[in-house]
Amino acid sequence: MKQTITLLLMLITSYSVWAQKTDSPNKKSLKPIVIEGNVENVADGTIILLFNRNKPFKSYSYELSDTVKEGKFRIVHNPKNDDEEYNLGIATYHYGLNFYASPGSTTKVMGKGADIESWRVINDNPMQKIANDYRAYLDLKVPDYYEIRKKRDWMDQDDDEYPNVLKAYDDAQVKYAECMLEYLSDKPFNSVLLKQLCWAACHAYITNNENMKERVRQLLPKIPADCSDDEGTDLAEIKHFIVSKPKSLTIGDKMVDFLLYDHAGNEHHLTEFNDNGKYLLLEFNSRTCQGCMEHRQYDALNGLYNNHSDKVDIVMVNCDEPYFWKLQCKNAKKWGRDPWNEWNDMKSCDDVKQRYGSISGPSYFFISPDGTILGRISDKENLQKAIQKYFDLANIENKN
């Protein structure tokens, strides 16, 4: 993916298949929530997924789905609680649409094209009304944000216009974050604004913008003292993001070491392959990201492993939350398992991603035998060609 920020946000609003809990038989029955979609330029058969947030955490559990037919879809969900937050997603798209809905209500969803995050939500939930007011303000201040992002996401990096589009997107991201903080400065605390403050903190973290971090710190007193800051909550993320971090590594830098764990719980170091005479392919990815796994370049990875294990080591840095990493350790058949190394730091690998500059989503780093970073690409670029370029390997096609 070519996102510089959003895919971390995608990690912040990850589409996770959380273990479902059985409702207590004594719990009161709540009226269903109806979601009715009316969208344009979305192909028939497109799968629309409904996720429910596992409050106070940032993960979501899958609930239901429907397919688009003649621009319409309809989902009826039986809520577990009065106060619920949801996310709509498209199975083949990496963004999501957050919204709030009350039991017994109908939510209208409207939009154009597959950029689901730009769709509109209308219902009578008080929190959704706050979210809509906030969205209207940002649309007024940065009206072309979603269009610029769409161009950046789908334009080929070899296109002559790509550098200009990338700069326009980076500028739009800065303006978006600044407008967000401006809006939050005179608003009372609520969960909608806490989520957006987390977004702004994330942007400041990725761009290492100390001025923006300070503006986030100035808004922290608005947050009530009883707001949870347990790992995985918005507040925990905010506090993590506004701590000053070292600059991300660039091409030509030496690897920086981190402690990680394999599926059996054994300790490993990122630099343990240095000076063994072999190259290292470092992959940052997430098994809970359906799109990341569907578009993963398996032929190139398997070809490299099957044909050149004597010349190259492979490590996948698994960036999933500890909860899901533990599930993956227990059930390789369900989650998938590669024959090469796969490690996680049991902390969602946030520090590892930041140091290596891999916040934006799946990416690959090419490391020399002495630990020097030779190059990096996103998962949208051709991995096979990059392997041939950086590792000087002629044949990496998978023969098995």
Image (tube, helix red, strand yellow):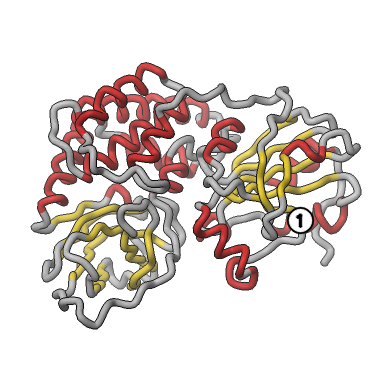
Residue 319 vs residue 28: left or right? right
* Residue 76 visible in the current orientation: no
Image height of 343 relative to 222, above or below: below
User: Which residue has dot 1 on it?
Assistant: 340
Q: x, y percentage for residue 379? A: 60, 46
Label 1: how many Cα within 10 Å (few below 14, some 14–19, many 20+):
few
| Residue located 76% across and 48% down the image | 314
The kind of residue on which mark 1 rests is Trp
The residue positioned farthest toward the bottom in the image shown? 25
Image coordinates of residue 355 in percent, x first then y, are: 59, 30
Q: Place residue 327 in its image quadrant.
A: bottom right
Residue drawn at x 70%, y 46% as measured from the top left = 383
Residue found 28% across the figure and 59% down from its top: 86
For residue 239, above or below residue 387: above
From the viewer's side, name the closer residue of 200 and 91. Answer: 200
Quarter where residue 205 is shown = top left
Q: Residue at x 13, y 41 (%)?
A: 133
